[in-house]
Image: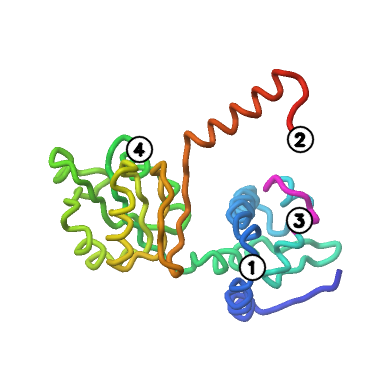
Amino acid sequence: MGVRRTSGRDGVRRAAREAQAVPHATVGRLPGYLRALEETAADGAVLTSSDELAARAGVTPAQLRKDLSFLGSYGRRGVGYDVGHLREQITVALGLADVRRVLLVGVGNLGHALANYAGIAERGFVLVGLVDADPAVVGTTVAGLVVEPAADLAAVVARTGATIAVLTTPAAVAQRVCDELVAAGVVGVLTFAPCALRVPPHVDVRAVDVASELQILAFHDRARSVGGGVS
C-alpha cells in the first residue's frame, strides 16, 4: 500500500470534499472509528495500526482500510495511522468540525434521559432547547434548560439555530411535529417514535425503534433455542 501524506489543513479540506461521496454504509461505521480513535488517544498512543483500530471498532482490518480510503486516508506501511490526524479527518467527514445545535422535542422519561446524556456534548453537539406539549412539563428545568411550549416550536428553532432535532413524542403526533420542525428549518431528525416519518429529500431521518430491535433479538434468540440458528 502506497503512502499518501498531506498537511493537516490540506488533509481536512480533502476529507471534507471526499466525504460527499462516502457510501452510506461507511458513514454508519465512522462514529465507531472515531470512538475507537478517542479510546486509543486516551491510552496515550500517537500511532495505531489497522489491526488494532479495527479490533477496537469491531470490524475487519480490510473493511476499515476500505472505509478510510474513501476519506483519502492511507496508513503508512510499517507505521500505521496518525491517531490525531485521522480523528480530525473523520470529525470533518461527519460534519463535527463545527458544533451542531440540537433541539429535543418530547421531555418525558426518555427525553429526560437524553437531555442529561453527557455523550451529546462529548460528541460535538450542544443541546440548545427543550420543547413539550404537556403544561405540567412546560416551564420546568431539565439539564439546565427550561422546557418551552410546543406552540412555540418554530420560534425556538429560529432563536436557537437548531438544525437537528431529537423526537421522543408519541407516534400519533410524530409526523405533525416532524413537519413543523422541517418547516422551521431543521434538516436532521433523530426519532424514537415507533412510526415511519415522511420528509422532503433534503431532510435526513434516523429512526431508533427500541421495540423493533428487541423483537429482532427475540427472533434470533428463538432461532437458537430451537436448534439451528438462522440462515
Residue, x 67% and y 70% (percent of image)?
71
Give 91 or 134, whichever is nearer the viewer.
134
Q: For the residues marked 2 and 1, what is the alpha-carbon distance in whole angstroms?
A: 30 Å
Q: Is residue 180 above or below residue 109?
A: below
Question: Would you call the spot at circle 2 few (<14 residues within 10 Å), some (14-19), or many (20 or more)?
Answer: few
Residue, x 35% and y 64% (percent of image)?
186
Residue, x 64% and y 68% (percent of image)?
22
The tag on residue 110 is: 4
Q: Position of residue 129 (x, y in %)?
A: 26, 55
Q: In this figure, which residue is indicated by the disc labeled 1?
A: 22
Magenta-colored stretch includes residue 60: yes
Question: Would you call the spot at circle 1 few (<14 residues within 10 Å), some (14-19), or many (20 or more)?
Answer: some
Quadrant of residue 1 within the rendered picture: bottom right
Q: In this figure, which residue is indicated by the disc labeled 3?
A: 63
Q: Give the range drawn in magenta.
A: 56-64
Q: Which of marks 3 and 2 is in front?
A: 2
Q: In this figure, which residue is indicated by the disc labeled 2?
A: 231
Dot 3 or dot 2: first in sequence order is: 3
